[in-house]
Image (spheres, helix red, strand yellow):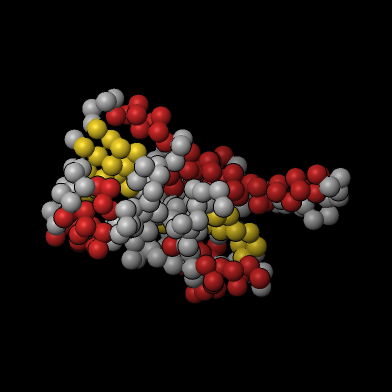
Amino acid sequence: MKVVAYSIKPFEKEFLARANQKKHDITLISNPLGPETASFAAGKDAVIVFTNDDVSADVIDKLADFGIKYITTRSSGTDHIDKNAAEKRSIKLANVPAYSPEAIAEQAVALALALNRRLVKANEQSHNFDFRLDNLIGFNFHGKTVGIIGLGKTGLAAAAIFNGFGCQVLGHDILPPETVENIKLTDLNKLFSESDIISIHVPLTDQTRHLINKDSIALMKDGVMIINTSRGGLVQTTDVLTALDNGKIGYLGLDVYEFEKGLFFADH
């Protein structure tokens, strides 16, 4: 099969070559997919994309005209792909079934710890020979209530780590697991109102877009910590910034950003 892979970063090349094992003829390019670069797919059978690529209806029509039959994305999320347009043009789609749940869970907890213990500020001060502790006071996770939104593999992995800190863990999912250990299942409103720390582990859909907004923030404790390692669109950015300014949100840890397209994965 002849394939073109868009938005390739230098660190990906070795892994893609190893996974391919010379089975397919894959052309790796750093250009993102869009209306101007769709022509690179001419003569290919499939394209490989990433979250920052433009896989809208117009682009999919161009790809189909070039003979593309398959689109696969190097992500578990597929919200950047117009699925209806792909179906109309009989293009089959594939995605990564799951990332390492432990890796993402550990990243979420790392953000929480860095915020709580003021690690970025402490590092900055120490480089300036400022060793005061006045503005570096944190709190113990032990005994705090952590709300996990999304109880898939990643959410459960994060819950297990927070359990290890001695936290009480609340969990919410529209399709919760049949059995969970050390997690109290609850509705979203109660999770929002009772959690000291909220960690989000759900995909971006029409139902979850702007899950964190002024209305849900209003239900939360003053000074709540919010961690998002899922998708940027789960958070209404302007609402969160307002809540940070007025102190309603005390800590915000983001591994993603609502408007990250064209920004992330590059040295600007």
Percent coordinates x, y for residue 227 in the rendering: 54, 55
- Tell me: 155 left or right of 96: right
Image quarter of residue 35: bottom left
Toward the viewer: 185 or 72?
72
Residue at 61% from the left image edge and 62% from the top image edge: 224
Tell me which residue sits at (80%, 44%) in the image: 127
Residue 96's spot in the image, x, y percent? 32, 42
Residue at 33%, 66% (x, y): give it: 206
251 relative position to 100: left or right: right
Q: Nearer the viewer, residue 162 or 259?
A: 259
Residue 150: x and y, percent? Answer: 41, 53
217 up-or-down from 83: above or below = below
For residue 177, say whether it is visible.
Answer: no
Tell me the residue at 53%/41% (across/down). Answer: 106
Q: Is residue 183 visible?
A: yes
Left or right for 75, reference 118: left
Looking at the rendered structure, the number of numbered marks drawn on it comes to 0
188 or 180: which is nearer to us?
Answer: 188
Which quadrant: the N terminus?
top left
**Residue 140 percent across, percent down from the top left:** 68, 48
- Against 138, residue 242 (above or below) is below
